[in-house]
Amino acid sequence: MPALRDKAGRPVVVVTGMGVVTSLGVGKTDNWAKLTAGESGIREISRFSTEGLRTRVAGTVDFVPAEPLCAPELTERFAALAAQEAVAESGIGTPGDFPGPLFVAMPPVEIEWPQRRAMAQASGSNTDIDYDALLRVCATGQFHAYHERFLFGSVAEHLADTFGTKGSPISLSTACASGGTAIQLGLEAIRRGETDAALCIGTDGSVNAESLVRFSLLSALSTQNEPASAAAKPFSKNRDGFVMAEGAGALVLESYESATARGARILGVIEGCGEMADSFHRTRSSPDGKPVIGCINNAITDAGLVPDDIDYVNAHGTGTPENDKMEYVGAAAVFGERVKSIPITSTKSMIGHTLSAAGAVEAMVTLMTLQHQRIPPTINYQVPDPAIPLDVVPNVARDARMRHAISNSFGFGGQNVCLVLGGEPT
């Protein structure tokens, strides 16, 4: 059978396995049921003290053990859970022998407060530790485990060992677009003929006191703590910031030829990807929306489609005043008056913003939306914003006919990625 090619003559890239862990639960089945029921996974933080903090809620994955408490450890655990489900569903290779590369989107890594305190105490200080003291303590060799754990590449290396991926594992961080970037790299590797399959993961376990404080200092977080389930309000007039969350999404990508040759079930198609950088500001996006507009248009063009072909948008939809308005401006420029009638929803209203994992988690949700022909709602949409006239599928899931959808990821520093996804090869 001849290989199936897209309109540009490139191999068609399909998805044969997906896995997920969010604050709603572990696995596709549990997450999909709760997302379409409009349930929230956002809750009061219990892992650490929030005394004195303005924000006390997050989308934490409390059912996965958090000790030792550090972001790289949780980031790896979430990734392993999601990847295990994705690889098992795909049925590709054999256990511990995945026939392709690994692309892992994850947060930046640094030694955290609990570990700093331990090193300060070892240096003879009960307060802080300066650089010279740090060198002396490290030279003793008693903190070798910290040295290994707090290397950026350690998460991907451990996952590569566990799943037996091929080649050097790629660790990447493009802010909140990271999960989309991981999928983009897998898509491009298969299109170039470098591999027939790729394991793409977006994962983040960085809900800790230090991260919470830093985002609070940026005035980026919602401060509506009661009830916690109502804190994330994307596209609402009374939105006041995003809600930090954690979790992971994993996708097994394959060429259509490889998947059909081994009789794999095809869950969807990665039809196209677009990116565009925005150097306007370290955190803010350009108010004219040009980088977002270009990113979306690039993705649609890469898929060989036109804007009228898009039936659904899984929005970045963080719930910050500026991001939601900017995303509307971008979508309106791409879709014109039709933007008011295209279903555009935010998964973050229920699970929060999973940061480095968001692009992968939301791509998976978008593919399931196409599979089931059912759109999860944007919950907490009680006060519409007249400046953002969108069909956000408010509060209740909706059945709809959809063939092509996009999933947006717009990160701090203007790192923008848009994926175009389809339900089946054409």
Image (cartoon, grey):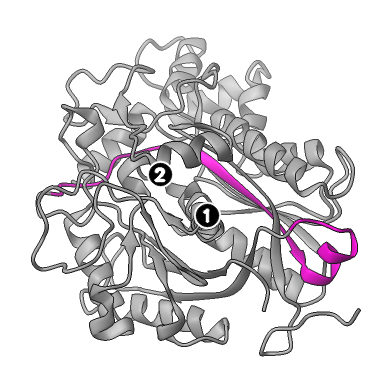
418 up-or-down from 7: above or below: above
Q: Tell me, yes or no, whether the two marked residues, 2 and 1, touch with CB atoms within 8 Å.
A: yes
Could you tell which of marks 2 and 1 lies nearer the N-terminus?
2
Along the viewing direction, whichever of 358 and 133 lies nearer the viewer: 358
Q: Is residue 248 magenta?
A: yes
- Identify residue for label 1: 372
The amino acid sitting under disc 2 is Thr
Q: CA distance from mark 2 to mark 1?
A: 11 Å
Q: Is residue 127 magenta?
A: no
Can you tell which mark lies on residue 36?
A: 2
Taking 385 as reference, is 133 left or right?
right
41 up-or-down from 18: above or below: above
Along the viewing direction, whichever of 46 and 38 lies nearer the viewer: 38
SS category of the residue bearing label 2: helix
Q: Position of residue 78 (x, y in %)?
A: 58, 34
Q: From the image, which quarter does the C terminus lie in?
A: bottom right
Q: How many marks are shown on the rendered structure?
A: 2
The amino acid sitting under disc 1 is His
Give the magenta-colored segment's residue range. 239-265
Q: Position of residue 405 (x, y in %)?
A: 47, 69
Q: Position of residue 252 (x, y in %)?
A: 71, 54
| Residue 210 visible in the current orientation | yes
Along the viewing direction, whichever of 262 and 42 lies nearer the viewer: 262
Taking 365 as reference, is 11 left or right?
right
User: Residue at horizontal 74%, vertical 51%?
Assistant: 169
Q: Position of residue 354 (x, y in %)?
A: 42, 44
